[in-house]
């Protein structure tokens, strides 16, 4: 399509926030940072305590474990650093999904992950595990929920770049607005807002 | 330290794990075959020994600390080293997200993800003392997403994510970490599928046949001896990962489970 040939009225500028209410779920440091970057999102620590009707467009932000060398791993540390964030994420998503299916409503779900840990970081394989698990979780959920008009996408964010560079922060707001907007449809995607730090590398 | 290299294979009693054990034994490894089913894994040990190979069978529950430690003690104290660790133990239980009990999610994480990672953590020191080695995690093509497999694909994707970071962390010690992502492999479960479902699956596989356990074993044998290959995921799926969209096939499969 030759965009210059379109009449001006047909060109919709990218919005900074969705046209419908959108929620950010999570209480970890990454969630607080994301809210600072996207203050238009309404916040919730957990979907269970949030009014049912409100939760149609949700961005879930899991906690990411602190670095721990692999030779110091035990089942106990792994359960706390790996299983708990995965369990928390699936619980929050399942709560929203079950409500949406029951109410026969479309939904827009986004999980935000740190781009560096998704790519892999020396000395924090627990974080890489959480990111890898959630990427696959969302791939499967997007396949399952497409027929229910529920979109599931992942946003991979370099929050440091977003905090330092206004253009990257603006891109984050626009991507998130698009993914959480009931007037748009995109599912099963992994969108990188990482200022190009993932380029030239094999993505997960 | 002995000259004979040692490989530990979990979930080695049958199927893919058994094939990996047999293949590594034929490559002159002393193979420690671990599985919950001790009687079955003893038969694998016998099979290896009858073929002229070396093997030790252990009853191994990857979710139990005592069991993991006892297995690694055997490698360290009786065999003197550990060169290859193959995390093959795993369970599969599919259910749609809205009906998935969280207990099911946790139980799959315990066997498919936390247990293997804990075993890796406990193996690092011994592998370093052995001069390096290879860790091969058996993930799944479900890592790319599979209808109805939220818990399973999460656990297998977790292994992929772990392997990338572990490769960065352990490379300096001469330890490689890779994943294999098997596709549809001939097992008791797949053999029992209705013919029309099998035909649909064939159609989604570029090479038009279902894989055999030894297809995975050959890939493991390669990665066990590939010191310049690390942090990778090797799909062994007959091209299914690049093939026909499989949503309808998977929907139908779930109806039969």
Image (cartoon, coloured by chain):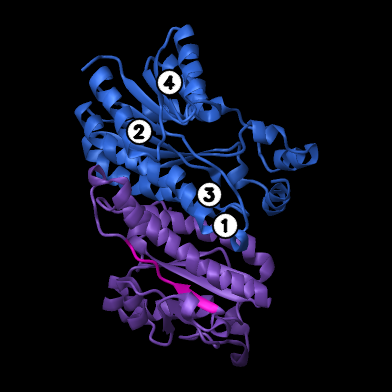
Instruction: Between label 1 and label 3, give the one nearer the viewer.
Output: 3
Q: Which residue is mark 4?
A: B24
Give the residue at x 58% y 87%: A11
Question: Could you tell me if residue A125 is visible in this image?
Answer: no
Q: Quadrant of residue B55?
A: top left
Residue bounds of the magenta highlight: A57-64
Camera-nearest label, 3 or 2: 2
**Residue under label 3:** B152
Looking at the rendered image, the disc whose residue lies closer to the viewer, 3 or 4, is: 3
Inter-mark Cα distance, 1 to 3: 10 Å
Q: Nearer the viewer, residue A95 or B217?
A: A95
Which chain hosts label 3?
A: B
Q: Secondary structure at mark 3?
A: helix
Residue B228, position as x, y percentages in the image: 32, 34
Residue at x 70% of width, y 41% of height = B201
How crowded pointer 4 is (Cα within 10 Å; few <14, some 14-19, many 20+) is rated as: many
Above or below for B134 versus A189: above
Indicate which label's residue lies in the foreground, 2 or 4.
Answer: 2
**Mark 2 highlights which residue?**
B67
The residue under label 1 is A140
Task: Give residue A71's position: percent from left, percent from top.
Answer: 23, 42
Q: Marks 1 and 2: same chain?
A: no
Chain A, hue in figure: purple
């Amino acid at each position: 399509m030759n965009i210059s040939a379109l009449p001006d009225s047909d060109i919709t500028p990218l919005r900074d926030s969705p046209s419908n209410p959108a929620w950010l779920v999570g209480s970890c440091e990454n969630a607080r940072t994301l809210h600072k970057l996207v203050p238009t999102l309404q916040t919730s620590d957990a979907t269970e305590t949030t009014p049912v009707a409100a939760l149609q467009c949700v961005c879930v932000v899991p906690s990411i474990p602190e670095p721990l060398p692999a030779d110091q791993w035990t089942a106990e540390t792994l359960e706390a650093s790996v299983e708990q964030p995965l369990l928390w994420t699936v619980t929050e998503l399942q709560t929203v999904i079950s409500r949406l299916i029951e109410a026969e409503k479309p939904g827009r779900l986004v999980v935000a992950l740190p781009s560096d840990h998704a790519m892999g970081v020396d000395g924090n394989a627990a974080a890489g595990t959480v990111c890898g698990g959630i990427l696959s979780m969302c791939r499967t959920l997007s396949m399952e929920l497409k027929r229910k008009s529920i979109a599931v996408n992942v946003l991979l964010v370099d929050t440091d770049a977003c905090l330092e560079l206004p253009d990257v922060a603006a891109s984050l707001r626009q991507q998130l607005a698009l993914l959480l907007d009931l007037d748009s449809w995109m599912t099963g995607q992994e969108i990188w807002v990482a200022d190009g730090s993932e380029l030239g590398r094999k993505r997960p | 330290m002995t000259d004979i290299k040692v490989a530990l294979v979990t979930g080695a009693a049958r199927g893919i794990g058994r094939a990996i054990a047999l293949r590594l034994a034929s490559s002159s490894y002393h193979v420690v075959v671990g599985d919950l089913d001790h009687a079955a894994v003893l038969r694998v040990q016998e099979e290896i020994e009858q073929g002229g190979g070396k093997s030790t069978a252990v009853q191994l529950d990857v979710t139990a600390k005592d069991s993991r430690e006892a297995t690694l003690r055997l490698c360290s104290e009786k065999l003197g080293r550990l060169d290859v660790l193959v995390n093959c133990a795993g369970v599969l239980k599919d259910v749609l997200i809205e009906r998935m009990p969280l207990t099911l999610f946790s139980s799959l994480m315990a066997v498919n993800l936390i247990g293997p990672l804990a075993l890796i953590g406990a193996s690092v020191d011994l592998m370093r003392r052995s001069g390096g080695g290879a860790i091969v995690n058996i993930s799944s093509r479900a890592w790319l997403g599979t209808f109805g497999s939220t818990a399973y694909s999460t656990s297998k994707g977790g292994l992929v994510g772990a392997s990338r970071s572990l490769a960065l962390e352990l490379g300096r010690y001469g330890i490689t970490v890779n994943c294999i992502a098997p596709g549809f492999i001939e097992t008791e479960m797949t053999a029992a599928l209705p013919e029309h479902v099998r035909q649909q699956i064939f159609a989604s596989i570029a090479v038009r046949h279902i894989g055999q356990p030894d297809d995975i074993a050959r890939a493991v044998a390669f990665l066990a001896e590939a010191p310049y290959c690390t942090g990778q995921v090797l799909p062994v799926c007959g091209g299914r990962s690049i093939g026909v969209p499989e949503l309808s096939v998977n929907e139908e499969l779930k109806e039969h489970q």
